Amino acid sequence: METDMCFECLQRRIESDFSDRLVFSYGVSDSHSALPLGSSAVVQMSNPNGDGSAYQFILVYIPTHYSNCLTKYVNEYIEENLQESCSNCGIDNISQDQADVAILETPSDKTISDSSTCNHSARFSCSRIITALASIAQVGICSYSVFEEIVANYLSGSLEDHILCSLSLLVEGKASGRDSINFLGLLGIPSFQENNFPGALRHPNIAPVLAILKTSGYTNLVLPRAPYTLENILHYSPNALKSEWHIKFLIYQILSALAYIHGLGVAHGYICPSSIMLTDSCWSWLRIFDKPWLGFNCSTRHNGHTDATPAKIGRCIEGCPSQRLYADLKLSSSIDWHSDFKRWWRGEMSNFEYLLILNRLAGRIWGDHTFHTVMPWVIDFSTKPDENCDAGWRDLSRSKWRLAKGDEQLDFTYSTSEIRHHVSDECLSELAVCSYKARRLPLSVLRTAVRSVYEPNEYPSTMQRLYQWTPDECIPEFFCDPQIFSSLHAGMTDLSVPSWAGSPQEFIKLHRDALESDRVSRQIHHWIDITFGYKMSGQAAIAAKNVMLSSSEPTKPRSVGRRQLFTRPHPMRQDAARRTCDGANGSTTHQCRPNEVECEESLLFETAYLQKLEEASAFAEHARHLGAPYGFHPEYFGKDVSPAEEPPGESSKGSMSMLSDIVRNNGVPFGIDLNYLLEHIEVEGEGSMGYQDFLLWRQRSSCMSIFSEDAAKDIFSVGCVLAELFLRKPFFDSTSLAMYLESGILPELMQELPPHTKVLVEACIQKDWKRRPSTKSLLDSPYFPATIKSSYLFLSPLQLLAKDVSRLRYAASFAKQGALKKMGTFAAEMCAPYCLPIVLTPLSDTEAEWAYILLKEFIKCLNPKAVKALVLPAIQKILQTTGYSHLKVSILQDSFVREIWNRVGKQAYLETIHPLVISNLCVAPHKRSAAAASVLLIGSSEELGVPVTIHQTILPLIQCFGKGLCADGIDVLVRIGGLLGEVFIVKQLLPLLKPVIHACIEVSYAKKPEPVQSWSALALIDCLMTLDGLVLYMSREMVVKELIDDRSCLHVMILMQKSVEFAVLQVAATTLMAVCQRIGPDLTALHVLPQLKDLFDELAFSREISEGPASLVRRSSKVYKPKIDGEAQIESRMDLALILYPSFASLLGIEKLRQCCATWLLLEQYLLRSHNWKWEYTGDPSRSGLESVILKRPLFGKGLTSEYNPAKLLLNGVGWSIPQSQGVRGAKNLIPQRWINEVRKNPVEIDASTSNLVKLEPWFWFPSPASCWDGPDFLGRVGGLKDELPWKIRASVIYSVRAHHGALRSLAVCQDECMVFTAGIGPGFKGTIQKWDLTRINCVSGYYGHDEVVNDVCVLSSSGRVASSDGTIHVWNSRTGKLISVFAEPSVDFTHLASPLSPVSKINAEQANMLNSNTLSSGILTSAFDGSLYTCMHQLESIEMLVAGTGNGSLRFIDISRGQMLHLWRGDSVESGFPSLISALCSCGSDTTQACGTRASPSWIAAGLNTGHCRLLDLRSGNVITSWRAHDGYVTKLAAPEDHLLVSSSHDRTLRIWDLRRNWPPQATIFKGHTDGVSSFSLWGQDVITISRNRIGLTSLSKPADEDGHLRIMPQKLYLADNGAKNLSVLSSISILPFSRLFLVGTEDGYLRICC
């Protein structure tokens, strides 16, 4: 510790060497010290670009005498540059910094540089090794300007960009230079070398040293701060290392870095979790240089000795108050918890010191506001602490959170929260720490951590108020530092000490005395149990009301958190007074003869003491892992041995030989090119590693000698770290390590390691260091599969300090050349998390092309599950970006979306991507993005089908009316209508648009807030523009019938409203004229003009016309109307005459118009006076007058009349082209806007194509959703498009078809909701499967290979296969109906396997039908049933497995992809004498989808039995988690809407919800209401549809209880939509089509009914 400074001195030193603009964040303690002492600090600097972001770096101070090699290296470098400057520029031009070199170099430094020697291997010189390890370091003199330059270079990505560019050229087959070849050599291409010739490239797994700077007495190192260390991961988020593969990948990186270091002839010396830095992507950096581990010191080598002497502050500034603050502390330079605990227990260490040690072990950092050292509040400051009085002392058996909140509130929180917890925050938050230290912190920190607006009066001003204000614990400064009370800010007063303390110094003394008092010493172990001990988890935490809110993302890396140090109750501190008395009694016993009573008392006292001593020793033994060693002390091996050195001649000869090889191969050494890399990265048939082969490697590796003992110690440390990663706790403690080194006895934990890992760890920790394998041997071992080596080769270049564009270019180029395909699906999935983040940054057009290529390659090479989990979230983030993005436009191409459909299905697309496509049409989208989104929606509508298009495209777009929907969004509605035809427009679109108009008109009447009025006006304009476009695709007769007839013209209705805005009137008038042009003059005169009579009369007799010339004078200044974007805007209702009358005159002719309009004279007089308009015959009645009047629409709707419509074009990678969606199906209906006038001239062409439509068009049966839609919600917010459209079930049968001769047993719906498979009873009581196309309700194919009744059918999402069960399971191709495989249990007759169509059991058809004939039966089975037959199935989609329940309670697992039967879990009978038939199955996450669109990986399986019982089984082990009586009858179905919820139904007429987080057995929420048994149910979100006999029941999982406390299901009968008759058929099965907002039911008489 003699090299350490207190953090205050360190901060002052940094400000002196650099500037106060370099923000000191916090100091980093060295050597695991518990005190705020160290030589490293985390500093923060704002981005030089000025974007407001800040970046953190690690600044290390190394005394010049402590690392003479480094000091000499810096001095020589600076002197060399100084000489160059002198020779080039002259002595007068030398900078001031360079001139200060002589001043900075002290005489002692000069002496050290001249006389010191190195203790590392002599293979290479110090300067060569330092250059190899810090190849990118900038060497110079400390100054703020130099630091700014370092940060700018680091952030620019230019430090190692040339290497990545060279690699990209190599991958692209171009001349690349030597950088790429040299870098590949670091990665083991063609192989790892133990005799490296040091180059000038940084190894990707060595922490980058950005600068080596010289200052007075010190050498400074600058490193980027990594967000995590491996120690953080092990303590706070061990699940971040998700699998064994990730652990091996991490170790492979560490070994690769060590191989490079060992090749230089040096060893690291301190491999441990805290020295392994991890980036955001968990890429590892091995930290070096900041400690004398590499041997760059002039004294003795670091050998791991534990310094037991008290801490001394060796290099603090003179007069530092910390010298006095920490002078009385008895802490050693490093932590040995075992001995420290004993010292504390015996009273030889203070409570303050012991708590500091526990904080350090828990990872807390003194000075880090986000994870500060925590201390207990021991008094409440109401009175002066007095041990003889109970007043004023805090109860340490309860947490401060519990004392502040109260037990009642915590109990309420625990009982009502979804995730059970009492405590929602850390015991010491950043807010509390900054509030405590507010008087000493910069205002910028307070504005960031406490409140953005600084208000000094809001900070507590007294200690008592501070204690009452916070539920958080205390900080150590209140026990040792009087300065914390003094304010540095003018507006903030000093923190007042209690009245019983005269000064801050006196308060600190009294407060510290209270912490060390006997009263606190007797209770402090309770506080330790709560903060660091066994009361942090399990039942003890529940009893102490200390259950912490768990992380919602357990696999996310964390740098802070709560670490539980102990799992047993912490012993009470031994009372010092009793020990003194005990010692006195003991001495008296030996000096004189006591009487009998004294002997008995002494014996009892000694017995009690010995018992406590035994308890303390047992506690210390159980917590030995807190002092985990990762190396060993030299005394166990005798004398310290210097590293083995090669003879100087041989070393020099070898180095020169290698150098000459490199020089000779100046081009491309070893013939490395793209083909070589692809061959090296290829994974061929990755299989399981043979254990015998691994043992053979172990034997060979033991014969290979390692070059030095220090390197062997590194290997020992790697073995310890590897074991800890698997065990999640340290492998050695001090006792077990000593035992192993003395007698060779390995820890018992060795037996818990996997076999292959056990062999590797044993090899690494061999007692004879010469028999340990080298890093090269370990890297080449079969322990690391080919996928790890391939992934490492692909990913390492991406970790260079290079520009994002270079990373993207390299990854895309390598992937495009086939790297991902060569490495295989699994390795590609492992690489994706490292690659996909680089496509999310702002991209140029060139970068967008590379990002697009990379996304497409990952979609091709990953399996569907990985695409959902990794690629789709990245695409979501891209689509959520605002503004123009070339990549977004590329993603919105039809071809790209179809690739997604082909890989993951339409369901995943609709859940994750489709809502974001629609959002790109709302709220001021970019022109090109909106164009691409509109083309995609139009092109996909026909394939998605009418129901899905209506609910997922049409309704969300209508819902956006008035909320910023662009012209391309309206164009989508219009063109989908044209694509799907007139019947679709009339039946689906118009019934949705008309309620919008009526709703908007009603809003205009009411007195609504201004935003609502604006939204309604804009929505009216959007609706009118949509109608205007749809008219083009309708026949004249249909336009008249739907929009004009019966005096219900919507346009006229709007024109008659006096409360709507003028812009709406203008659009209504112009669109009305478009309608009239469409229907022609005759129909206009017959149907439209009579409805306009009242409007023309209003305009003719208005006040403005009656005033005559007087009004003309007033309006003379308004003749020239204002224009917006070239379009005139009307200013009054009278301007409607200017729009309508001349237009009708040109359309009908003036004479016919005058006949129809009785007030024609007044209107023409007004137009002549006000607008100088009069009728002039031009010979072309269709154009007369129109050109003299501006009829353009206002700005709101200009998009549809524009000559250029961006939706007609799409950026397709290189340039503009016709969209693919317009070149395929239905292209005849996607008529470009510039052809509209031609179509209007020849309406017969449209009529011929849309007339006489037959009933059996696609989706002919789908009704309009208008009846169950309440219209747009103008008070709603934009966003959450899927959640804004609730599903209102009408319990109406809209179509029925007879699917089977007998009962329909089961339904299975494909993800696209266009195909459904029905399983039922066919002719001869045999099971049949029918495949139905819902587009036209046609049975397109079937499967007839079952001889028995089919009881279950399942669509296998992994391919186009279907599984069906009739007691045996048949897997068959859904397209061809060809049988693929049959699965049956051994007791079934196997003769059918050769001929799948033969009978599979001895049960006759009648008996099989009897088993399933009545779903409402009691569930009692006949004795004829074979218990080995399959009764139900459930697909584990995420792991591509099928699990089947049997009649004897067993579960059979089947590998779908390989077609193999796997393990069988046998079940026991619940009741003796009756078989436990499994009647229903489900798994965790089976009925829910994560936010990223992927199914959650299941962790449990639930099985329902015919006896009413339910079993919960652990999917990983097969153990029964719990079993309980769930129902009083046959369990008919199970579902898991959430990971912690289970829903079950039964013949006992109830639906029950089980919260699996509650106590076992779980308590149920019971829904009642059915009068018959519930035969099945289906879930959609929180809504549940149940079926019971001929009724359905509707309820919600979140439904509140009734007044009597019961939860009710509302049963109702299904009604036929055509005649209103009730459905009398018994319902047997149900399935929901969520995106179509429909549900299907099967009936006992064989009908398939489509309901809404």
Image (cartoon, grey):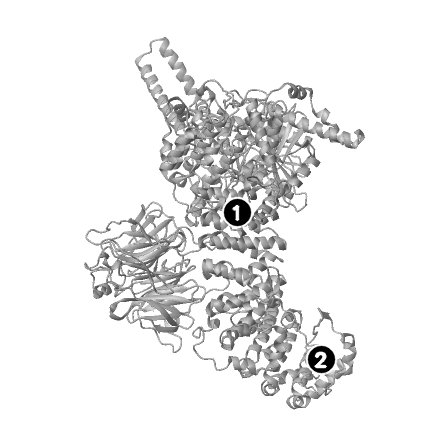
Residue 652 placement (x, y as % from top left)? 58, 25
Taking depth in this image into account, of 21 and 1304 the one nearest to the observer is 1304
Assign a secondary structure to mark 1. helix
Q: Are marks 1 and 2 in contact (CB under 8 Å)?
A: no
Q: Is residue 1568 left or right of residue 1010?
A: left
Q: Is residue 1345 above or below residue 117?
A: below
- Quadrant holding the N terminus: top right
- On the question of residue 500 being in view, the answer is no
Quarter holding residue 1244:
bottom right
Quarter holding residue 1245:
bottom right
Can you identify the residue that label 2 sits on?
A: 1187
The residue furthest top is 592
Residue 1427 placement (x, y as % from top left)? 23, 55
Badge 1 local density, few (<14 within 10 Å), some, or many (20+)?
few
Taking depth in this image into account, of 688 and 151 the one nearest to the observer is 688
Q: Is residue 702 above or below residue 1297?
A: above
- How far apart are labels 1 and 2 at the CA level? 69 Å
Q: Which mark is residue 675?
A: 1
The amino acid at mark 2 is Glu
- On the question of residue 615 being in view, the answer is yes
Badge nearest the viewer, 1 or 2: 1
Residue 1636 placement (x, y as % from top left)? 45, 66
Residue 916 placement (x, y as % from top left)? 54, 60
Which of disc 2 and disc 1 is earlier in sequence? 1
Q: Is residue 1342 left or right of residue 776?
A: left
- Quadrant holding the C terminus: bottom left
Taking depth in this image into account, of 170 and 578 the one nearest to the observer is 170
